[in-house]
Amino acid sequence: MTVLSFLKTFQQVLKLQRCPVLDPEELLQQQQREKLLRLYGKK
């Protein structure tokens, strides 16, 4: 995922949630976990 598409998605999520912004570090860790889950889930 490119940085641009990430930012677009991030903005969409913020619009949908309309809640306080999550800690960027926390968000990154969550995304990394999801990526790993997808990778290992396919095997």
Image (tube, grey):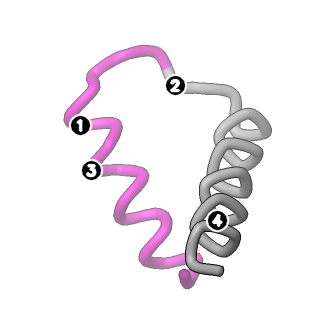
CA–CA distance between discs 2 and 3?
12 Å
In the image, which residues are magenta?
1-20
Type of amino acid under label 3: Gln
Q: Which mark is residue 21?
A: 2
What amino acid is labelled 1 in the image?
A: Lys
Residue at left offset 71%, top offset 49%: 28
Q: Amino acid at mark 2?
A: Val
Identify the residue shown where x is 36% and y is 60%.
Answer: 9
Q: Give yes or no for residue 10 being in the magenta stretch.
A: yes
Q: CA distance from mark 1 to mark 4?
A: 23 Å
Q: Quadrant of the N terminus?
A: bottom right
Secondary structure, mark 3, is helix
Q: CA distance from mark 2 to mark 4?
A: 21 Å
In terms of sequence position, does the residue under pointer 2 or pointer 3 come before the other?
Answer: 3
For the residues carrying marks 2 and 4, which lies nearer the camera in this image? 4
Identify the mark at residue 15; answer none if there is no mark.
Answer: 1
Tag 4 or tag 1, which sits nearer the N-term? 1
Q: Amino acid at mark 4?
A: Lys
Q: Quadrant of residue 41?
A: bottom right
Q: Residue at x 49, y 67 (%)?
A: 6
Label 4 packing within 10 angstroms: few (<14), some (14-19), many (20+): few
Q: Residues within 10 Å of mark 3 (few under 14, many from 20)?
A: few
Q: Is residue 37 magenta?
A: no
Residue pointed to by mark 3:
12
